[in-house]
Image (cartoon, helix red, strand yellow):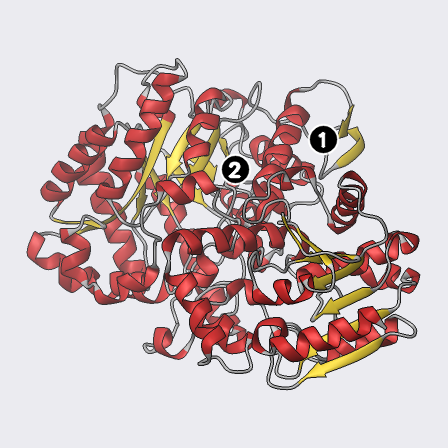
Amino acid sequence: MQRAGSGPPLVFLHGAGGPMIGAPFLDDLARHFTVYAPAHPGFGPGQGVEHIDDVVDFALYYLDFLDTIGVEKPHLVGHSFGGMLAAEMAALAPGQLDRLVLICPAGLWLDAVPIPDFFTFSPEQLVRTALHDPNGPVGKMLLAQFREPSRALESHRCLASAGKFMWPIPDKGLKKRIHRVKAPTLVVWGASDGLIPTAYADAFQRAIPGSRVAILNGAGHLPMLEQREAFVDAVTRFLRR
Amino acid sequence: MKSHFFHLMPYQHLPADFARRYRSVWVDVPSQLYDPVKGHVLYNEYLDELEHADQAGFDGVCVNEHHSNAYGLMPSPNLMLAALARRTRRAALIVLGNSLALYNPPIRVAEEMAMLDVMSGGRFVAGFPVGSSMDTNFAYGQTPATLREKYREAHDLVMRAWTTPEPFTFNGKYTQLRYVNVWPRPLQKPHPPVWIPGTGSVETWEWVARNDYSYSFLSYFGFKPAQHSMQGYWETVERVGKDRNPYRAGYLQLVAISDSDARAEAEYAEAAEYFYHRCLHVPDHFFAAPGYMTPKSMQAAKTPFSFETLKKLSWKDFVDEGYIVAGSPATVRDRLRAVVEELHVGHLMLLLQFGNLSKEQTLRNTELYAREVMPSLRGLWSEWTDHWYPQPLRESERVGEPARFVAAEA
C-alpha cells in the first residue's frame, strides 16, 4: 500500500488494470489529504484473492481493512472496478465513510448501452477504447507497459482477478444495494470513455440521491491521467467543500 | 494397443473466405452460416461413419462437447452416444467428455452417463474435460478464475454419487444438494472408466495420476508438442508412485491413408486445410480468457500459443511437422508405431474425418486403417493389462439387435 501526505484520510481503490502506485494524481491529492492507496488482493503485490468469493466479500474485506489500519471515516475514491467496490462499501456501511468519489465506476448495467467485452481486448484495442487520445502520452505509456513481458503477465493476473468479480458482465447486485448510499457523492467521468460510456454517469446519479456528476472533456476512462489537473481540481473542491 | 475412432463433427459448409471475413469459428461465429438442412445430412453421415468404425473393428468411438461453434457440432455428445448405443455392438462408447462445470447441478452428468452405461451394457467411458475457454468462459459464461475449482468440486460430487450406495447430502461451494441419489446406477463397478482429456496443463497430470485415471492428450499438432507433454505426464506418474502402464494415457492423431504416399495430398490436402484454416480459426482473445490458465501453466507455456500461425501452413507443413500422419498404409503403420512407442500411450485416438473430408473418403480412410494398420498395432503393450477399458456385460447377458416390429413384405 502507498501512504502519502497529510490531512483528512482519503482511500483510493484502483481499477482492473492494477495498482497506480506512484501516479502523479495521487501525489496531487496528497497535498491536501493523507492518501492510502492499497493494492487489491490478487493485484500487483496484493495476495489472498482466493479467500474472497464475490463483490460483497470484497467490500467487507476493505471495511475490515480500514479498521485494521486505524483509518476512521475516510473519503473513499474508487476508479472503475475500484469504483464498484467503493459504491458497495458505501452501500453496506453508510456510517463508516465521509465522502464518496466514483471515477467511471463499474457495477451497473444498461441493456441499451452494453459495456463492451473488455476481457477480450488487445492492448491496442483497450487503449483505443478507453482513452480520449490513444496517440497521446498516456496511450504511449500504457502500450509501452504492455510490451514489457513481466508487466504483460502482471496485467493478465490483474484482469484474471477482476474477472472473478465482473465475469461475464459487471452487474453483481449493486443495483439492489446502491439506494443505501448516504455519503455525499461525486461521480467523475471522462466524456470520451468508450469502456464504460457516460450514460452510466446518469445511471449512477439517478441511483444515488443528491449525487453530482462532473464530466471531464478531453478524457476517457482514465480522466485522472488524461486530464490530471481538471480531475484533481474537481475532486479536491468536492471533498473540501 | 487400442484404436479408437474420434469424431469432432465439424460443420463442412463454411465459405472459402471464412477466416478473412469472420473473426472467429467459435463464440461469435454468425449463426446464419449454419444451414440445418445441410446439418441434417451431416449428423446422419457422421453417425454412419461412427457405426462403420464399430463394424470395422475399432475398440472405441469417441465424441466430445463444444458450444457456439462451427468446429464441432456436439453441444451434447451424450445424444450422439445414445444414438450409437442402439446401433453399435462392440466398440466402447467414449465421451471426452462432459465439461462438468457447465452442468447445474452436476449430477445431471452422473445421471446421463449412468443411462449410457446401462443402455450400452457397460460399454461406456466417462471423460471429464475442464473444457476450452471458448466453451466454458465465453459461450457458457463461467468465471475463469473459479472454473477449475468448480470443475473439481463437480467431479467429486459425480464420483461420490456413483459410488455411494445410499442417498447423501452434499454441501459444496458451487452445488448444495440435500439429497444426492442418482438413478439409474452405472452398470460398471465401482464406476465407468474415467479418462481426462487435456492439452498439457501441469496441474492436471498430478491429479490424473493420483486418481488412477487415464490421461488423454488431445492436440492437433502431432508428435512434437505431445512428446513434451507426455514426458511431463509420465514423470509425474512415476513421482506419485504409479506404474508406467501405457493405458494410463491416450493420444489423438490426425491420420490420412491412401494407396500410396504420393496420392495422400490429392485426397486429403483440401480437408486438412479446411480443418486448420477454418475449423481452428480462433482468435487469441477467445483462446484463453484472463484467469483460464493457471499462473503455473502460463509460465510453463514459454510463448503464448496462437492459432494465427496455422494460416501460413499448408499440406506439406502439416505432414512434415507431424500434425497429420499421412501416406500409404505402410508409411502410416511405421510412423504410428514409432509415435505410440515414443509417447508410451495405450489408447490411440484416430481423427480419420477432419475438416470437410467427405463421407466416402472417410469410410475409405477408416477401412484402410482397420484393415492395414490396426492389426499390426494391436499386439503392442500386450504385457500390460488395460484397466481403463470398459468391462461390459457378457454377451449372454446383453440384449440382442433392436427388435423390428413391422414384418418384412412377403
Q: Image quarter for residue B172?
A: top right
Image coordinates of residue A25 in percent, x first then y, are: 62, 67
Q: Residues within 10 Å of mark 2 (few under 14, many from 20)?
A: many
Confirm or deny contact between disc 2 and disc 1 (CB under 8 A). no
| Residue at left offset 64%, top offset 58% | A14
Residue type (three-letter) at the residue carrying disc 2: Phe
- Above/below status of B95 relative to A191: above
Counting labels gives 2
**Which residue is nearer to you in this view: A4 or A132?**
A4
| Residue at left offset 46%, top offset 54% | B288
Residue that numbered label 2 is attached to: B128
**Which residue is nearer to you in this view: B362 or B344?**
B344
Q: From the viewer's perspective, is B71 left or right of B344?
A: right
| Residue at left offset 26%, top offset 27% | B344
- Above/below status of A47 relative to B220: above
Q: From the viewer's perspective, is A191 left or right of A207?
A: left
Letter of the chain that mark 2 sits on in the rendering: B
Q: From the viewer's perspective, is A23 left or right of B165?
A: left
* Residue A39 in sight: yes
Image coordinates of residue B132 in percent, x first then y, are: 48, 50
State which quarter of the image contains the N terminus of chain B: top left
Residue that numbered label 1 is attached to: B183
